Each structure stands twice: as C-alpha cells, then as structure tokens.
Amino acid sequence: GIQVEQSPPDLILQEGANSTLRCNFSDSVNNLQWFHQNPWGQLINLFYIPSGTKQNGRLSATTVATERYSLLYISSSQTTDSGVYFCAASPYNTDKLIFGTGTRLQVFP
Amino acid sequence: DAGVTQSPTHLIKTRGQQVTLRCSPKSGHDTVSWYQQALGQGPQFIFQYYEEEERQRGNFPDRFSGHQYPNYSSELNVNALLLGDSALYLCASSSFRGAGDTQYFGPGTRLTVL
C-alpha cells in the first residue's frame, strides 16, 4: 500500500521564524490533506491539496503530484502554531486516508 | 453549521468489555469514516460507511464493527476489549463522490482500557 513519510519529525522555532514541512508519498493519490492536531486531539483541516498551490493567511501549501511530494509553509510562526502537523493521502479509487507520522512543532516566545 | 460531533468525550472500560462510540457527520455529508490513533502515532483507518453499508475496511479485526443510520450518523462498536485498544478514536465525515473528497474530523473519543 501507499506509504506517507513526513520530515522533520520534530521542529523547534522561536516566534516569528519561518518553517517548511515536507510530505512524501509513494504512489499516485487523489486526495492530499494537511492537518494540525491541537493538544486536545482535534484534527483541524488546513488544506485539501492533491495538486497545485494554496494559501491561507500565514500558511501555504504546494503539492507536486508528478514528483509525489507536498510542502507546508508556515511564515511568522506564533506560539499557537505549536502542535503536530499531519499529512494524509488517499490512494486512487479509495477514500481512506493514510497518515504520515507527523511533525511535532514547538514555537517558543 | 454544526461540524462533526462525537460522544462520549472520554471512556474508561476494562478488558473483555464492549464499547460503543457515536458520531454525527457535518451537515450535508453522507459518508462517515472511523480512525484509531494510538499515542504518538498518526491515525489509522478502521472502516468507512456510506448508504448504511461498510464500503472500505482497514486492517482491523472483526472485533471492530460499525453501523450507519438513515440520518447518516454512525456507531463504532468494539467487542472483547484489549489493553491495546486504548486510543483516541476519530470520526471523519465527507460527501460521497467516489473518492478523493475532503474529510472533516470530529474531536474524538479517548478510550482507556484497564
């Protein structure tokens, strides 16, 4: 089955810094989503981005489907950005999301 | 517009017992998927329900079963609980379009098996 890998596993930043999170997937996908999981476990949708580029405030994401990777950019990070960021992908003809192992982000003031 | 809701929030059971978790999908959604998230790991797909039938299933034993009602709400049942079933159980809803739609997650039910 499809494999989803995320890097780096851990990231420590000072407030105001920028960061890039990477997600590699091993096969073609029809769904690629980025989530932020808060300390209470809630998975918050950031982007639905099987291909192309999207921006939402300080966050943006790019997926290059032909090269099987996606990037999540966080600019001017804030302490509220702390948490675990997951990338998840669905293989073609299925709806099940395969999650990566996540990137744990800690932003300090 | 109500999002995905789940109940209960927390649950404590002992080994061998049975548990039922509930999920109401986001308004306008007709498909419900269930995921298990063990501590420190990413969520793992259990199964998906559409039109009151199980459409897809992940690599989970038959102790895990589900149901979907005509109003699209869903239940996850786990029989003969094991210590290893302790996890956060997440429900996600979407609109069925064959494949590839955005999935929205509920707040989860944290199950502890003693």
Image: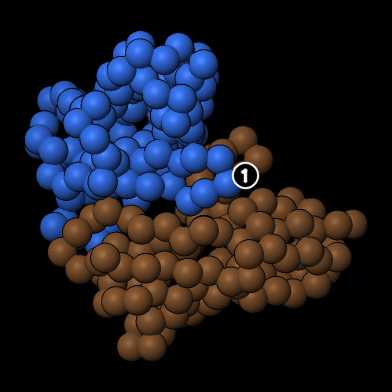
Q: Which residue occupies the foreground of this view, B87 or B9? A: B87
Q: Which residue occupies the foreground of this view, B92 or A24? A: A24
Q: Colour of chain B?
A: blue
Which residue position is annotated with label 1? A38
Which chain is drawn using brown?
Answer: A
Q: Quadrant of residue A25?
A: bottom left
Q: Chain of mark 1?
A: A
Q: Is residue B80 above or below residue B52?
A: above
Q: Is residue B11 left or right of residue B96?
A: right
Who's the residue at 34% across and 50% down the image? B103
Q: Quadrant of residue A15?
A: bottom right
Count the marks: how many?
1
Q: Quadrant of residue B21?
A: top left
Q: Position of residue B113 (x, y in %)?
A: 48, 19
Q: Position of residue B38 (x, y in %)?
A: 49, 40
Who's the residue at 44% across and 80% down the image? A69
Q: Position of residue B31 (x, y in %)?
A: 21, 41
Q: Is residue B51 left or right of residue B63?
A: left
Question: How is the structure coloured here?
Answer: by chain
Q: Is residue A53 above or below residue A59?
A: below
Q: Position of residue A3 (x, y in %)?
A: 37, 68
Q: Amino acid at mark 1?
A: Asn
